[in-house]
Image (spheres, rainbow, N blue to C red):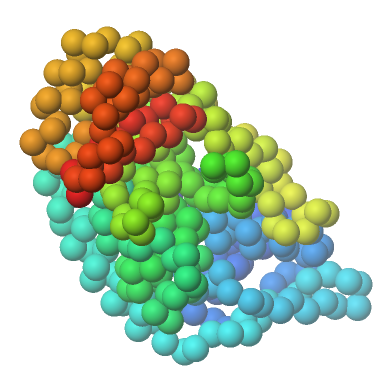
Amino acid sequence: MAKQLDMNHGFYYQFLNNAQKQTYDTLLTHMRQFETAFEIDPVSTADYLIANRAVLDDHPELWWADTPARYSFNIMGKVTKHQFLELKGNEKQITAAMAQAIQQVMEQSRQLDSDWKMALLFHDYIVQKTKFNTGRDTDGYLDQNISSVFMGGNSVCAGYARAFMLLCRSAGIECIYVSGPASKNGNNIRHAWNLALIDGSWTWIDCTWDDLILNDGTESCEHDYFCLNDTWISKEHPIPSYLETGNAQARLKISFPKASSLKMEYHRLAGTYFEKYDANAVLASTQAQAPGGKVRLRFGSTQALAQAVQAIVVQNNLLNQPQLRVNKDDVMCVLRIDRK
């Protein structure tokens, strides 16, 4: 269950050297005061960039600080000053407004009796509230941070993942913001997702890719990326070994906790996972879900998924029934059937 967390030092702090830790603490102190410019003890550019990235990825509540900044050097080439360039002066007001929205979600979470249920609440809240920002319209809120979720309602992966991390940590659930390369539908992209300690086990969660955009442009709250282990997440999300800053000379070697269990994977707990294709079991699950107009089935292999598609979709000619929407994910081994 949830516990009291260290709200000063997040996951990435442990990998920093002493100079980086000192810079991290200095940046955190001044950023929490919404200071627009401040001095820091002289530090190398690489150490400064790494410390700054670690602070921002450990602290999603500093949403406004992940914006363009300039750093100044002394005569020895050390960084001695941090200055934000594009702040609008309303950051405190927006933070206070977000706190009210966050508090409402926290009040709901206190009625739940497990980390898993709380994490599911946070996941569904973010996915259902947020529209994936394909058109770069964020209602004036930056889509790389939590304000785009809690205030604007339009975001991208960074906003989704930071919002989920903030809600989890506010509830006492350890959660890490993870960023790195990923691959979806043959497209290689830069992406962000989460690793969370749920009821004693580390597990992977991707709220963004559970906000599924269907062919007709509508969005659907899915749970295909809720509580995966290393094997399943790695099908599309290579687990990073470095915290990147955008500077090849400033990379931090990291190592994530192992996520080996699938005992909390959503489809397994929902009774919609089948290691192999079992006609009777799949039929029973399909019939149970059908009255709700939404059928979801996950299988242990692409072969089992193909068998299900043949038996359910092809033999029943579902693709030619205009009232139904059918799609599948061969990588995540999921079959989806919706009544329009």
Tell me the quarter of the picture where residue 236 sits: top right
Q: Residue at x 29, y 77 (%)?
A: 97
Coordinates of residue 271 in the picture (x, y in percent): 21, 22
Q: Residue at x 30, y 36 (%)?
A: 319
Q: Position of residue 251 (x, y in %)?
A: 74, 50
Front position in the image: 20 or 87: 87
Locate the N terminus and report the quarter of the image it occupies: top left
Most extreme residue toward the bottom is 89
Image coords of residue 125 (percent x, y): 25, 55
Pick the residue in front: 73 or 285.
285
- In this rendering, does residue 60 appear at all? no
**Number of numbered discs on residues:** 0
Q: Quadrant of residue 81?
A: bottom right
Q: Is residue 307 above or below residue 80?
A: above
Q: Where residue 196 sits: x, y (%)?
A: 41, 39
Left or right position of 331 against 99: right
Looking at this view, is 123 or 104 the one in front? 123
Q: Quadrant of residue 314?
A: top left
Q: Is residue 121 above or below residue 86?
A: above
Residue in the picture at 28% in, 38% down = 320
Q: Nearer the viewer, residue 217 or 78?
A: 217
Looking at the image, residue 204 lies above or below residue 163: above
Q: For the view shown, which residue lies furthest in the left direction?
A: 291
- Report if residue 41 is visible in the image: yes
